[in-house]
Image (cartoon, rainbow, N blue to C red):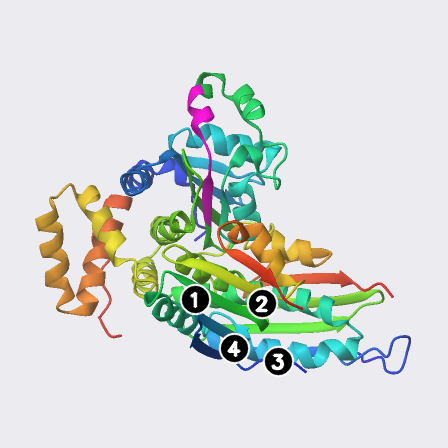
Amino acid sequence: MTTVSGAHRGVPDPLQIRVPAIPASLAVIRARLRRWLPTAAVNPATAAELLLAVGEAASNAVEHATRGARRDVELEVSARATETGLAVTIKDNGRWHAPPNRPGTRGHGSKLMTALVDTVTITPTPDGTTVEMRKELHP
Amino acid sequence: MSPVHFQPTQHPQLLALLHRILERIQSDLYEAVGLAITIHDRRRDEHASVIAALGVGSELVGAQLSGLGGPVADALAYQVPVLSLDLWTDDRWPQLTLDAVSERAPHHTDDLEQLHGEAAVPGVWADDATVAVSCTLSQPASAATVASLITYEQLVSAALITTAAENATAIEDIITVLQSRGAIEQAKGALMGLVRCDAEYAWRMLRRASQEFNVKLRELSVALVEHVSGARPSSPTPEHR
Amino acid sequence: MTNSQFRLTAAVAEQSPVVTATGDIDLANVGEFGDTLTKAAAQSDSITVDLSEVSYCDSTAVRALFAVAATTKLALIVPAEGPITTLLGISGLDRVATVVTRN
């Protein structure tokens, strides 16, 4: 993971959070994002939108984790600057039941997410599913 | 073992259970003119579809999903409960008009004309799959309509999760869902309908179980799983909680 | 700098109870939020919930608000713009609750 420092908009170090998928973790994710987003030159209104998009995704993951018999489900949230904006990734290693048969989109169906950010890409992996959101930041 | 992909429409007992839940909602909300349970399983289909309905539920929701928009479409998409006081005049969905829907369902115009409000409550029942329970009324929908549907949605999601599950952890799932969301009362009603017992039997079952908390939920979940999947659940795991 | 720590205060105003929430409302505290609203609403047939100082709110809180609005006349005070207003519009809660914006 390379860190570009000093260039263009003062690209910040990527953010990396790993927490248990429990309700109390949602506040931790928000606190860390709130500290990080300004370093990525994100204005408060955009930050609020991103917090909501990530919050909904994380909240869903926590609810699903607490529904299953599996313990020790973890959430990973990471954020990094792209050339034109931000990419935020949410990944959990829990699952509802059997993993999806074939790769496809996973959604908690959240068009709220797509209303708040520019693109949402979902990728199932062997140990969980990853949701990546990208938001373009206009100067 | 590669799991066979779960399709709700291929489980007649699940569909019967969902239908019975709708009948129960109808007895709770007597202004309901249409009820529907809609699922969107992105692993199978990019489109959502109605899998159980009463009254004009199927026609109305079908029209919404076909592009006219509406509370069900929005509830599924945004994963937030959606309420409308009057569908035909709601500025959120300008294309959802009585004419547009009647065109698709000409034999139901009389019923459609009675419609005023709708409420839709979404849930998630698998990694890639969402569900919405919706009710359309001869009056404006109210917050009470939404609050009522919120509890039924929990039961619907529990039924879908249970049937979809391929192993005994389904029982744990439904136990946890019932526990965490307090859906016991709804389960009791559904149980009466499902097991075709009278109120007294259902109550005896629950009360016996309620003396030992875990057993109550287990009885419920076992009974529901049995009925829904038509088979005894696999051997119970020890009750340590 | 927003204080995201969750706080609830309930006061009895002339007309009806006012519950003021500050900070974030999420899955972890929505139960407490809902309980406080229910208790406050039990004393009156209307309730005002001031969310203007709420720094985070998602569909979890919307569900709790629908539950209160089901039995009690609900007035909401919200920030003029932002996610809360968006959620109220999408959900239609703004059609069954009185919404007042405050900057």
Q: Is residue C22 left or right of residue B140?
A: right
* Mark closest to the chain's N terminus, 4 or 3: 4
* Residue plotted at (73% across, 72% down): A44
Judging depth in this view, the residue of A139 and A21 nearest the camera is A139
Residue A51 pos. (x, y %): 64, 69
| Callouts 2 and 1 in the same chain | no
| Callouts 3 and 1 in the same chain | no
Q: Is residue B53 above or below residue A27?
A: above
Disc 4 to disc 3, C-alpha distance: 10 Å
The residue where tag 1 is placed is C15
The residue where tag 2 is placed is A55
Disc 2 to disc 1, C-alpha distance: 35 Å
**Dot 1: chain letter:** C
Element assignment for label 1: loop
* Mark closest to the chain's N terminus, 4 or 2: 4
**Dot 4: chain letter:** A
Q: Is residue A97 visible?
A: no
The residue where tag 4 is placed is A25
* Residue plotted at (56% across, 56% down): C88
Disc 4 to disc 2, C-alpha distance: 11 Å
Residue A35 pos. (x, y %): 69, 81
Disc 3 to disc 1, C-alpha distance: 37 Å
| Callouts 1 and 4 in the same chain | no
Q: Is residue B51 left or right of residue A56?
A: left
Judging depth in this view, the residue of B79 and B126 nearest the camera is B79
What span is colored magenta in the figure?
B110-121
Q: Is residue B10 above or below residue C13?
A: above
Element assignment for label 4: helix
Within the magenta stretch, is there residue C47?
no
Residue A114 pos. (x, y %): 67, 54
Give the quadrant of residue A87.
bottom right
- Specify the amino acid type for callout 4: Ser
